[in-house]
Structures are given as C-alpha cells and as structure tokens.
Amino acid sequence: MKYISTRGQSPALSFEEVVLTGLAPDGGLFVPQTLPQFSREEIASWAGLPYNELALKVISPFVDGAIPTADLKGIIDASYSDFRHRAIAPLVQSGHNEWILELFHGPTLAFKDFALQFLGHLLDYILDKRGQKVVIMGATSGDTGSAAIEGCRRCKNIDIFILHPHGRVSDVQRRQMTTVMSDNIHNIAVEGNFDDCQNMVKASFGDQSFLPDGRQLVAVNSINWARIMAQIVYYFWAALSVGGPHRPVSFAVPTGNFGDIFAGYLARGMGLPVDQLVIGTNANDILHRCISSNDHSKKPIEHSLSPSMDIMASSNFERLLFDLYGKDGAAIDSLMASLGAGSVSQLDPAALAQARKVFSSYRLDDAETLQVISDEYESSDYLLDPHSAIGLQAGRQCRRSPTTPMICLATAHPAKFPAAVMQAGYPESPPLPHHMADLFEREERFHVEANDLSKVQAFMAANITV
Ligand SMILES: *Cc1c(COP(=O)(O)O)cnc(C)c1O
C-alpha cells in the first residue's frame, strides 16, 4: 500500500514513511492510493468481535505487511489498555433508533485518545525497529496536547514538546498535560496566544536546524494519516452493534478539522453501508456554509463553548476534496491556492452535489448548545459535554429516515467542560472519573517561556532526554 499526496507533486510513501511524516512536501496531505475493500459477508463475519480484534481487521490492509500481524496486535492491545470501559467505545441508546457512541473513556476523556494512544505506540515500534529517535512538537489550545502527551508518556524514542498559551487553557486541560511526570514530556507555557504557539511550531518544522544532529520533528496534529486510520475502526464497531452491515446506518459528528468524520467517509468507501454523515459545527461554521450554500469563505475565529471545534478552515477537508475532484492533484493544488488566497470561495457544483449525497450539516451557536445540554439532562438524565451536544442535535435535525439508526459521536466527557455544563443549568462541577479524581492535587511541571521563537527552540535543544 502506497500513500500519495492530495496535491500530486510528492513521491508516494510507504506506510512507515507516512506515519513519520506530517504534511507532504508539496503542501498536500497523504491519502492511501487505493482504499481497502471489504465485502458485506466479510464485514458481517466480524459481528461480536471485541474492539481490539475488529481494529486489527480494519487496520491490517492499510499496514499491508509493513508490521507483522502479531506485533500490530500488540500495538493495538497496548493502545486501548488504558481505556476505562470494558467495551472501549460503548453505545448508549438516546432515542428511537438513536444512539450515542461514547468515545471519551480514554486516559484524557476525549475521542482523540483513540488515535493518539495508537500513534504513540505505533511510532515507538517503528522507531525501535529503525534505531531512530524523534522529537514531537505541537501547539494546543486544549484536547490535542493532553492526548498526545498521554500517548507518548511511555515512548522510549520520543521527546514531546507541547506549547500552550500561558494562562489561556482551562485548569482541567492544563493539568492533564502538566501533571504527567515522565522525563520525555515537556510542557512549554508561552507568554502569548494560541496563534503564537502555532506559528512557532510551523516555523520550527520549516527550519529544523536548531535540533541536535540526527533528530527530526514529527507532527501529531490530525493531518497525520495514522490518526485518521485508527478512527475508522469505531465506525465499523458502532454499525456492527446496531445491525450493520445488514442495514445502513447514519452518523452525526461534532466537527472541527474534519478528521473524525472523514474516517467515517472512509469506512463507507471501504464497504460499510452508511446512509448519512452529518456534520455538526459551532459558530465556526465554514463546513456548514460550504455544504448548505457552497460558501467556503474564511471568517475570523469565534471563541465558543466547544473550543476543540473552533477553527477557521478544516485541514482534513482537503482529503475529501481530493476524492470529489477525481483524485486530480493539480486541480486540488490550484483549488487550495485560490481558497487560501480568498479569490475563490465556492466548490465545483458537481463536486458539491456528490458530497451532498452523503453529507448534510447543521450549525449550533452557544445558546442552542446549552439548550441541548439542558434538555437532554432534563428529559433523560444524560449529561452531554458541549461538543457531544452539537453532534446529537445535528443528527436529530438532519435525519432523513426514522428507520435508519442514527449514531451520534460523543467526543468528550462532560467533566472536561465544567463551566459550560454549569452554564446549562447543571448544579455542580461534574465529577471527574475516579482515576482522575485527584487531578487538582497532583504536582504540576511546566516551563514558562517568552513569546520568542529562538528561546523556545533553545529550551527544546537543551532538554532533549531520550
Ligand atoms: C478535536 C475534537 C473535535 C473535532 O474533531 P475533528 O477531527 O477535528 O473534526 C470534536 N470534539 C472534541 C471533544 C475534540 O477534542
């Protein structure tokens, strides 16, 4: 299996190479050259498999022999061993033919653990084999940083440096990063905002000469192919749990960078009968505007109660566009240039029509999000976090058929967003799960640094430990 760039100008990569790479050199994103295909019979034969065994079936064709099956099984088992639910991804019925897929039972209580636990173990395995060590650098305003840190805390071949804006992430989110006491974990609190952090990461990837010889940077943001791949599994898992593949199912997904829902699109492309894929957005609604009225213009970021979906443009959307434009790298290259420059804000109508066969979308502002949290708690005693509330409501609003199961992805535990949940009328801060109950008593460790690229890089170079 080879991986090719959406912009058609970079050489194809092997599985190992694509895991160690972020963006393609031509600025595109890597996608598999062909999608593995499963027949209905084969998918049906997986009914009842435990999550990890299903993951092995779904992931194996992408790895395509690059890792021996027994080792891949070991990586998968290690990745999901810290989840706090025996089912890994339990389904809870929330209405007639309507289900909530709880993806928040991992170590940091957000769905990003599914991909980043796996990526940490996968990277360490590949690096061991190559006798190589790398540096992960990332910027976070919340969930990604803690999930990446948890994913790498036991990696022998990786130093991880996560930049967050000093004083501007929530206490829970900061503590989930800064209380992990491994020598290879480095938190840098930058005296600036999230964009400053992100710009430093971009600049560092562009010129890595500050690193010691033989070290390179690896990206863990959602453009990394392995993250998308790991997320495909739970679409199969959920469908099999509610009667698939013998009947089609639909999914509703709270969406930011389009990584999560794109994994659902791939599951459909691999043979899983999927009727609708519903995109839920907050006020940062570029995807909703694009799907509903062909308006892909960028607007300034609005800070919402669902901060993990506060985006100006969705990086993984390019992977879908590549498919919709007939895998024409040159067309995507010029489309992305025009969308980026703002000279074009519409998609080709035929491509959009194609997308609309599968995708629909709904936008919730903060007021509606709070209303959904409050209504759901009142009617069913079920407490949603603000991101999950957006997914649930989008699924309800866009649903075409009452007989097709609608599976709404719950991407974070409500205890991660106590302020929003209390604003919705919940009387107290929702309790953290017991493995995290002492989070506020744990020792914190982070380095405060000026908003200055050379100082951040000097700190990194001096603190590489593995
Ligand atoms: C990252 C995140 C999302 C958005 O996922 P994308 O793959 O970026 O679309 C939604 N909810 C939560 C809680 C997240 O952390």
Image: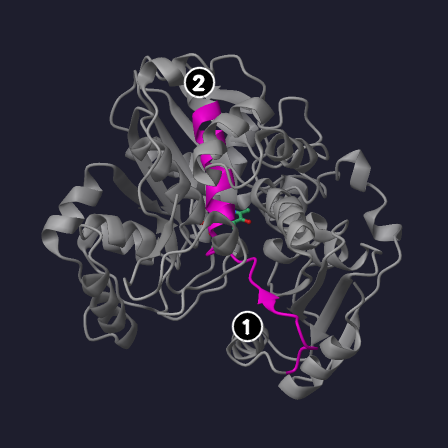
Q: Is residue 154 visible?
A: yes
On residue 240, the disc is 2
* 85 vs 22, nearest the viewer: 22
Location of residue 99 in the rendering, given as x and y in whole percent from the top left corner: 46, 23
On residue 405, the disc is none
Secondary structure at numbered mark 2: helix
Secondary structure at numbered mark 1: helix
State if disc 1 and disc 2 touch (CB < 8 Å).
no
Work out whether mark 2 precedes mark 1 in sequence or the reverse, and give the earlier one. 1
Question: Which quadrant holds the C terminus?
Answer: bottom right
Location of residue 150 in the rendering, given as x and y in whole percent from the top left corner: 71, 49
Q: What residue type is labelled 2?
A: Leu
Q: Which amino acid does label 1 sit on?
A: Gln
Range shown magenta: 210-237
Left or right: 225 as drawn, with respect to 298: right
Residue for point 77% across, 56% down: 175
95 up-or-down from 337: above or below: above
On residue 198, the disc is 1
Residue for point 62% across, 49% down: 126
Left or right: 21 as drawn, with respect to 358: right
78 up-or-down from 381: above or below: below
User: Magenta stretch: residue 214 in it?
Assistant: yes
How many residues crowd mark 2 within 10 Å: few (<14), some (14–19), many (20+)? many
How many residues crowd mark 1 within 10 Å: few (<14), some (14–19), many (20+)? some
* 329 vs 364, nearest the viewer: 329
Residue for point 33% across, 53% down: 319
Color scheme of the displayed model:
one colour
